[in-house]
Amino acid sequence: MIEAGNPAEEAQVIALALRQVLEEPGRTAALVTPDRNLARRVAALMRRYGVEVDDSAGRPLGVTPPAVFMRLLATACLREFSAVSLLALLKHPLACSHANRAAHLHSVRDLDRHVLRRLRAAPGIEGIARAIDSLQNEGKDLAKIGRDLARWWKGIAEILQPFSDLMHADQVDGEAMLDAHIEASQRLVGNGDLWLGDAGRELSSRLGDLKRCGEKLGRFAPEDYPALFTAWMDDVVVRPHYRTHPRLAIWGLMEARLQRMDLMILAGLNEGVWPGLPAPDPWLSPAIRRQLGLWTAERRVGQSAHDFAQLLGSPHVLLTRARKDGSAPTVPSRFWLRLEATVGGLPHDKELLAYARGLDHPPAVVPAERPRPAPPLEARPRKLSVTEVETLLTDPYVFYARKILRLRPLDPLEADPDAAERGTLLHKALENWAHKQIFAAEHLQAEMEAVLADIFRQPLIANLWRPRLERISRWVAERVHERMANNWTQAGIEASGEVEVAGVMLKGKADRVERNQDGLLAIIDYKTGEPPSHAQREAGYAPQLPLLALIAEHGGFKELGAAKAADLRYWKLSGGATEGKDVDALMYGRKPWISVEDWVALSVVRLREAVAEYLDGTAPFVAKLHPEYAKGQDYDVLARVDEWLGRSNGHDTGNIGRSIAAGDDHGQG
């Protein structure tokens, strides 16, 4: 007997036992279980050893690669080639398998990175073509990618267009729909590869049967077709005709009744699996079923017990069960418990269990150390933005990944708009509103409606965002009028400037700049999230505003001229219950904590220290140098933060979250 910890461990034990049998010439073995999931796990694990085991239950045709490919094609056409459905289709192993597969996958990757991740709604064939054409106006490199993609997509679109047109008709003829589906699938795969192998032959036979009775299919709505196709495929079973091992087998209880092997592995011996739970009968009571001569629940349990007892008569028997199924504990089968009670306990095989546990889980794993990359001096940049200074001070590794390795997180496919995107669009609306200089709340609301028009087509997002944006509009308009009454006038919006400091070029962009009658400036930074805390500002790890003041003082903002800043503020634009918050960055509570000059001096000291260490020196870019102030988790998986902080067991790096893509090929580390 073997009691495994979970179904995966049980399957590993069984696979090892089957593999062990093959070491003895002529010896045979079979796995007998009513648990189909366990049987599939074992069959998959045996392929690890290059052994294909004959499973008498076979596989439903609907889960085989050819049928899955055809179902993905129908789904992609129905969903107007949304990003997820289209990539699932084009990345399938059968897609364009007749052509240069490497070139096809390269084109799919470019389509994913440069086109689909920029689109929010399902674009359709024409929408994708327009998005590809727009790449040719975005620089030399993207223009070449756009031309190559356009040629590739034209061939794909010609194949998909006829079937897609049918999928968006009002009513379709079933026979015509099936013909168009088969035609598109064959052309997209090419060279007859769709019909190869046992699954391909079964699929061809099934589709032939459907075509022969095509006049019976009638007319139906196209959106029903993917579900119909799945139903047509799932009642067909694919069984291998050759290439399976002659000395191993996987059987159900019925197939095992009249067959014997040298080793019989009776697996899944948990209550509810062996014997299985009786199917409820909503129409007939047990007494009526008995009178009608139908099988009762008791008879089914008795039959399972009979099968179990017969199989125990084999020369060698291995009984297995898992103590947990997923996260819930299991109850041993009544046959397991009865057998132990009757014979006083059977020997437990500890050796196979130890092998299974050690196979995929080595005894010791050395966790990753905190990364400290130290690229050569010539690879370190000489230009910084004011926001990158904060990153360099708090989390140098993120600066290294962005600026030196040039890695950027990929936007998730078909993701709903998030707070970050709302902040970006809000900045754009505020910029448009300020340039028109009509400082009324209703005009700002109109600008927001215009900028967010695409997003507001989603009713849920519109209902969630619109009330917040209305409150933000009202609050911003009130603040602007209040400041105008205090003799502050608008001087610059999204003003960009740069100045050389400590041997590097420092650049920045001010969201809003105002000037008073004395020629002094106020620099205001919009925050849709939380502004930096007082502790962060006091420690010198929030240098954005003071460094913008430094650029202004040295005349870095060309349209403003050289001028000193007297006021530094954050406008928190939450749109919540408090609508907004005007944070004077020079105040702590109701008392001033620092002057503009002193804060600029503190930030310049921090900047010079960072430049001396990381850009002019050879200091390593340490991950999470000041974790209390570090922002974001996009690069945590790259830095393996969970491992060196002790939050991972070393066997699994966890969910990587968003993918990260290299921006070019000449980053150094």
Image: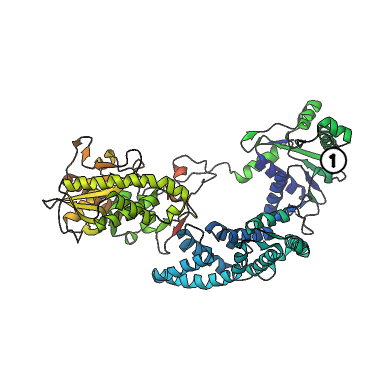
Identify residue for label 1. Answer: 315
* Relative to 558, 316 lies left or right: right
The colour scheme used to paint the residues is rainbow
Number of numbered discs overlaid on the protein picture? 1
* Relative to 169, 290 lies left or right: right
Looking at the picture, how far across and down is residue 164, in whole percent? 60, 65
Picture layout, residue 656 above or below residue 135: above
* Relative to 460, 404 lies left or right: left
Q: Amino acid at mark 1?
A: Pro
**Quarter assignment of residue 36:** top right
**Quarter assignment of residue 492:** bottom left
Helix, strand or loop at label 1? It is loop
Considering depth in this image, is 443 or 78 the residue closer to the camera? 443
Considering depth in this image, is 123 or 4 the residue closer to the camera? 123
**Quarter of the picture holding the N terminus:** top right
Picture layout, residue 81 above or below residue 620: below
Looking at the picture, how far across and down is residue 521, in whole percent? 17, 51
**Quarter of the picture holding the C terminus:** bottom left
Residue at the spot 23% in from the left edge and 59% down from the top edge: 498
In the current view of this chain or complex, which residue is farthest to the left?
518
Looking at the picture, how far across and down is residue 73, in whole percent? 62, 61
Residue 264 can be seen, yes or no:
yes
Considering depth in this image, is 547 or 167 the residue closer to the camera? 167
Residue 617 can be seen, yes or no:
no
Considering depth in this image, is 659 or 468 the residue closer to the camera? 468
Looking at the picture, how far across and down is residue 13, in whole percent? 70, 42
Residue at the spot 29% in from the left edge and 40% down from the top edge: 533
Badge 1: residue crowd in 10 Å (few <14, some 14–19, many ≥20): few
